[in-house]
Image (cartoon, rainbow, N blue to C red):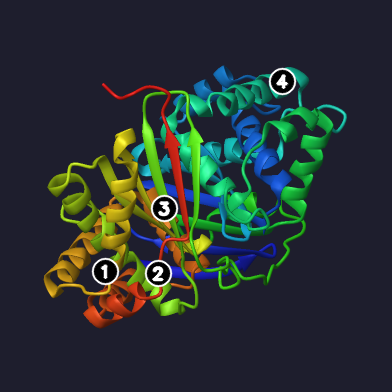
Amino acid sequence: MEIINKVINNVPVTILKTKKFKSVCGTLSFKSLVSKEKMTYRSVLRSILLESCKKYNTSEKLYIKALENYDAYYSASSSRYGNYHISSFTFASLIDKYTEEGNLKEVIDTFCEIIFNPLTFNNAFDKETFDMIVNSKKISLERIKESSDAYAERMTYKSLNQNKPYTFMSEIEYLDEMAPESLYKEYLSMIDESEVELILAGDINFDNPIIEKITSNIKNNKTFNDKLIISNDDEKDGIVKIKDNGCGTQNILNIIMYLKNVSDYELNYVAPLYRIILGGGSFSRLFRIIREENSLAYYSFARYEKDDGLMNVMMGIEKENHGKAFNLSCEVIDSMKKVDKKELEEAKKILISSLLESQDSIVNVIGRYYNAKLFDLPDIDLFIKKINNVKVKEIEDFASKLKPNLSYFLEGEKTNG
């Protein structure tokens, strides 16, 4: 795969040139500093833009147009990455060779209609569409408590330092104050006050007019220099224990560990392997010790949030096993200060295999490239080489920096079974 970079209309454009796929795929990303309000507003904005536009003013018309263009693919995401929020819009289409001349151009025309010509009137989004999307978001937020896993995860983060962006989430209070006019202002902010980037993948060249078609819509492209990864070096040591009541039968135990005073090398190459050894599958220590050997959990795994500087342990347990599960989990975490070489080699195989498999999708090819750029990672070949060079001692040294900082236990209303 050849990587070609160029700035067009003040927009950085990257082409990941490859003949591996029959499709062309592109992602246009809008990056800006995150805020509590933005998490809710951008989530609604993502949904309302995908719902309709002026040219195709219903979801049905938009869907039919996609089908007419040989089932063209359109999607959008609204995500927080550390200290930033990124709204991304993606298209994928068969190249004209496999459809008909002009099909890709029509797909891009629709893509631009979705992003740059929304269904608005007098500087406000269409009221009927707005109400439908906002009401749907409210229902989803109100129902979170019905899902023990989702509610426990939400409340675990809400138990952390409220000044840190990883506690920023969609909130009903912002939905209540939102109006079609205020959402339109947020839309203009996204278009005009973001750091914008276009990434394309497939058999495409810079002389293709679709690039000019997309980038010409960007009038102002900002640059942000704030660090992406959230630092937790200022967080206090020690552990806070919280017990909460749920409304279902599930009992969830979440344990948070701050990654403090760690290097970029540890964040990029050591931490992912540590996570797999600790709780990344059926061979991991959490699965083997907590679930299989002691039957204390239905599931038990670890999750690494690099942009937040956090390592999480999550498990579903019986209510009466709460104390035992927590104590044994702490022992397992502490045991990571000694790692077997066989465990490390297995973790490397799992991580590398997952990475290589992801490259079988053209959408994932773009996703991996963009994430690598965000986190200043090398290309896949060099990344794999660095992963293979990680030593046992580096895992153990990293493990010595981690200890439980928050225990959140969600107790179900009823006894399981």
Residue 50 % position (x, y)? 59, 32
- The kind of residue on which mark 2 rests is Leu
The secondary element bearing badge 2 is classed as loop
Residue 379 shows in the view: no
Marks 2/4 in contact by CB < 8 Å: the verdict is: no
Q: CA distance from mark 1 to mark 3?
A: 15 Å
Task: Name the residue: 42% across, 33% down.
Answer: 411
**Labels 1 and 2: the sequence-earlier one:** 1
Q: CA distance from mark 2 to mark 3?
A: 12 Å
Q: CA distance from mark 3 to mark 4?
A: 38 Å
Q: How many marks?
A: 4
Taking the spot 59% from the left edge, 29% from the top edge, the residue there is 141
Label 1: state its secondary structure. Answer: loop
Closer to the chain start, of discs 2 and 4, is: 4
Q: Amino acid at mark 1?
A: Met
Of labels 4 and 1, earlier in sequence is 4
Residue 146 screen position, x and y as percent: 47, 24
Identify the residue under disc 4.
Answer: 131
Q: Is residue 284 left or right of residue 90?
A: left
At label 3, the amino acid type is: Ile
Front-lying residue, 155 or 5? 155
Q: Residues within 10 Å of mark 3 (few under 14, many from 20)?
A: many
Q: Is residue 73 above or below residue 260?
A: above
Residue annotated with mark 2: 402
Q: Position of residue 362 (x, y in %)?
A: 36, 50
Q: Nearer the viewer, residue 229 or 321?
A: 321
State if disc 1 and disc 4 touch (CB < 8 Å). Answer: no
Residue depicted at 51% across the width and 21% down the height: 64
